[in-house]
Each structure stands twice: as structure tokens, then as C-alpha cells.
Amino acid sequence: MKKFIKLLMMLGLLMAVLSACGGSDDKTITVASKDFTEQFILGEMYALLLEDAGFTVERKLNLGGTPVAQQALLDGEIDVYPEYTGTGLLTVLKMDVMSDPQAVFDAVKEAYQDQFNLVWLDPAPMNNTQALAMTKTRAAELGITTFSDMVANADQLVLIGPPEFAEREDGVPGLRRVYGDFNFADFLTVDPGLRYQALLSGEADVVVAFGTDGELAAYDLQSLVDDKGLYPPYQVAPVVRQEALDANPEVADILNKVAPLLTDATMQRLNNEVSGNGREPADVAREFLVQQGLIE
């Protein structure tokens, strides 16, 4: 009996020590991403930074779209994933469009904390906004540099993009709301992976793009200026569960290290390494972090 009591006391002491140290579970972080190239790279960056700092990381990359990732955070199934300020503003919070990057970040940061108990860490300077692009030759031929110029020449232009762009509020209806009533000569709907090939082959004049698409840099395309501010800024930042930060506050400093390095040009190059050159997102992410001196 004395040995049994002694064993129970030792077990209790061990449990107390583990509790004081936070336990093994507290050092495990679940990193997720949405379902496209840039998200895979960013998710891997977050995971690699945390692993280098001693965390055990469970990856749930390619989780799905914004509603899936957001719900997974709220349900505690994941701890962090990269999100865009414009997406948070419009898709999640259903707020009005704002054009100032700091105002957008402040609005989503405050609302996410108040409504969801989620924390936005530091945003990167990159802006993965919805975009429209042309070859420089075709743009120069028609004198197009802005959305307004494009609208003025719309009856001569074939637009190519995903089918939903014809109906989404940030697609053709939004363009008409902000820039006036107009019609393209045609709108070709294609799988996202075929957009740029069709543009380069001359089948279309304008392509639906995103600001950090690797193809914009790889093919030296001209992104048109949204001169009337249809789209808000889409800066990326880690969104983290407050409970995960409370358990491991150092996570903020670890992930914030990479934010200032993620410019438009940098993300275009990294995205093209995957989408254009066929490399694995994990390899591209690791190479970048090593080159920047953030991991060994």
C-alpha cells in the first residue's frame, strides 16, 4: 500500500511538472492554408518558422476556401492560416469597401477580435488584390493604363476569366457600378490555369488576375490601375486563435519576422517558382527563408 501511495504521489508530481511546462500539446501548432499556390507557400513559411523555433507543427494545407478556413479557426481545428485584409473586410465581415491599407487592417483586426476572438498579426506590404491585366503591346496600342481607359475601349476588348467573374459583386457588376455601364466585346470563361495562355495567344485582350500572380512578372504583363478604387487592399497576414497565442505568445514574434519581406515583386517571383517552374511550395518557402536568414 505504501508503494502504491508513493507511486501515486510521483505520478501527481510528474503531472504537475508537465502542466507547469505547458505540456507537449501546448507546443503543437496547427497551420492551415487555403487552396491555391500562394497560400501553399505562405502556409509552409509559417510552418517552417514555427518548427525552427521548436514547435511541433501539424499541417492542414489546401484546406479549402475562406469560409472553410475561417470556420476551422472558430472550431479550434486549426490555429493559424494566412488571410487577406480585403477578404476579411468584404467576405467575412461584409463591411463597406475602404481603400486605405491601414484603415482596412485596423477595421478587420478590431472586428475579428471582437466578434471571433481571433488575432491578426502584422500584415505584409504585398497586395494580392483582384486585378485586370493586358500584354504591354496591346495596352500601348489602345492607350490603356487604367480601368477607366479599359471601360472606354471595352467594345474592342475580349475579357477572359473564371465564370463567376460575370456575376460576383467584385466582378463585372462591380466594375459597372463604379465605372459606369459598358459591355466587353466578349467574355471568355475558362479554368483559372488557362487564363494567361489564352491572353498570350491573342484569344483575349484582358485577363482577370490577382496582384501577386507569378505570371504577371513572368510574362511582363501590364496590370491596369484601379483608378476609382473598386477594390480594397488585400494585404496578407497570419490570423491566429487567441487561445493559441495565450498558450504560446512567442508565436506572434516568430511569424511577424517574415511580414516585411513579402512584397508584390517577391510574391510574384515565389508564386512563379511553383506555378511556372513546377517546384514544390515547401521547397520554395524553405529556400526563401534560408536566403533571408530566418531559418537554418
Image: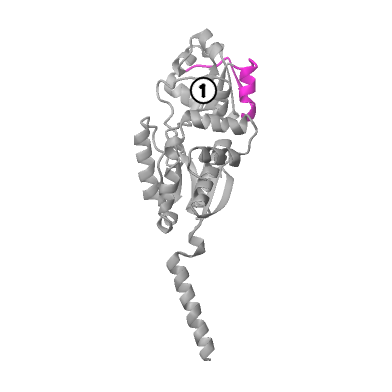
- Where's residue 7, x and y in %? 52, 83
- Where's residue 176, x and y in %? 47, 22
State whether residue 168 appears in this view.
no
Look at the numbered disc 1 and give the secondary structure of its residue.
strand
Rendering quarter of residue 205: top right
Q: Nearer the viewer, residue 233 or 255?
A: 255
- Where's residue 224, x and y in %? 48, 19
Tell me if residue 199 is in the magenta stretch.
Answer: yes
Residue flagged by tag 1: what amino acid is it? Leu
State whether residue 287 appears in this view.
yes
Q: Nearer the viewer, residue 15 or 288?
A: 288
What residue appears at the point 60 percent right and 40 percent down from the top-left corner?
A: 283
Rendering quarter of residue 221: top right
The residue stretch that appears in magenta = 181-204
Q: Which residue is mark 1?
A: 132
- Color scheme of the displayed model: one colour
Compared across the picture, whether 125 is left or right of 286 comes to left
Tell me if residue 187 is in the magenta stretch.
Answer: yes
